[in-house]
Amino acid sequence: MSNTIQKRLLTLREAADYLAMTNAALYQLVHRKRVPVVRLGRALRFDIQALDAWIDEHKEPARKPAA
């Protein structure tokens, strides 16, 4: 039996990598309260499910090609 635990909370660096942005850019989004974050004392953590939902909320629909 495998004891693999799926990691749900990401560090700032891991979340920035997941979102393909710099640590500084993600920190700015946190500071502006534009991205969901979990605060554990002074540590910032990012719920991967909340990040996926945030990505879905910010998707723009594709344009139809001009005829």
Image (cartoon, rainbow, N blue to C red):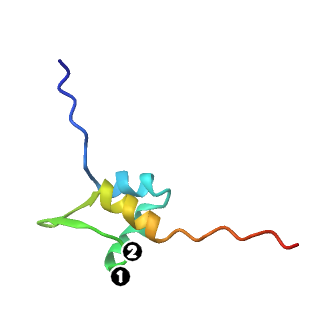
Work out which quarter of the rendered image holds the N terminus and state it: top left
Q: Position of residue 39 (x, y in %)?
A: 18, 67
Q: Amino acid at mark 1?
A: Arg
Outermost top residue: 1
In-front residue for pair 13/63: 63
Residue located at (43% from left, 52% from top): 18
CB contact under 8 Å: marks 2 and 1: yes
Residue located at (45% from left, 58% from top): 19
In-front residue for pair 33/22: 33
Q: Amino acid at mark 2?
A: Leu
Q: Is residue 57 above or below residue 16?
A: below
Horizontal side of residue 17 vs 2, given as left or right? right
Q: Residues within 10 Å of mark 1 (few under 14, many from 20)?
A: few
Q: Residues within 10 Å of mark 2 (few under 14, many from 20)?
A: few
Q: Position of residue 17 (x, y in %)?
A: 44, 52
Outermost right residue: 67
**Circle 2 sits in a helix, a strand or a loop, which is it?**
helix
Residue located at (58% from left, 71% from top): 60
Q: Is residue 7 above or below residue 48?
A: above
Please tell me in which quadrant of the rendered image residue 47 appears: bottom left
Report the residue marked by disc 2.
Answer: 29
Outermost front residue: 67
Report the residue marked by disc 1.
Answer: 32
Q: Is residue 32 above or below residue 39?
A: below
Horizontal side of residue 19 vs 27, given as left or right? right
Horizontal side of residue 61 vs 52, given as left or right? right
Q: Position of residue 50 (x, y in %)?
A: 31, 62
